[in-house]
Amino acid sequence: MPRKQRDALKQLDASLLGLKVALRHRQLGLARRLRSAAWEQVDLLPAHLTHEQRRDLFQAKLAIHALARHMEGRPHS
C-alpha cells in the first residue's frame, strides 16, 4: 500500500476513535467534524473499507442524528 494510503488509514482510525469519544461526551460539533474528516480519509483509500469501519461510520451517523435531536429537544424517531 502506498505511503499516502497508509497515512490515510492511520488518520481514519484516529478519526473514528475521536468520533467515538466525542459522541460519548455529547460534543455534537466535534463529532460532525470528525465524521467528515473520516470520510475525507476514505476518499484517499482503496475502493473498500473493512466491515468494522463501515459499521463504525454508520453507527456514528445514527448517533450524531440522535444527539442532535436530543439537544434540540425533539423526540427520538
Image: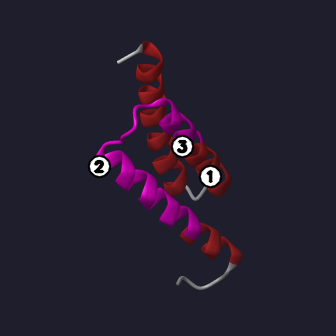
Side of 44 where 31 appears, left or right: right
Q: Tell me the amino acid under the disc marked 2.
A: His
Side of 55 where 67 appears, left or right: right
Q: Which residue is mark 1?
A: 32
Q: Tell me the amino acid under the disc marked 1.
A: Arg
Q: Which residue is mark 3?
A: 39
User: Image point 61% across, 75% down: which residue?
Assistant: 70
The span from disc 3 to disc 2 (Cα, nearest Å) is: 15 Å
In contact (CB < 8 Å): disc 3 and disc 1: no
Q: Earlier in the sequence, mark 1 or mark 2?
A: 1
Vertically, is 44 above or below 24?
above
The span from disc 1 to disc 2 (Cα, nearest Å) is: 21 Å
Q: Which residues are magenta?
A: 37-65
Relative image position of residue 10 (x, y in whole percent):
43, 27
The span from disc 3 to disc 1 (Cα, nearest Å) is: 11 Å
Q: Which residue is mark 2?
A: 51
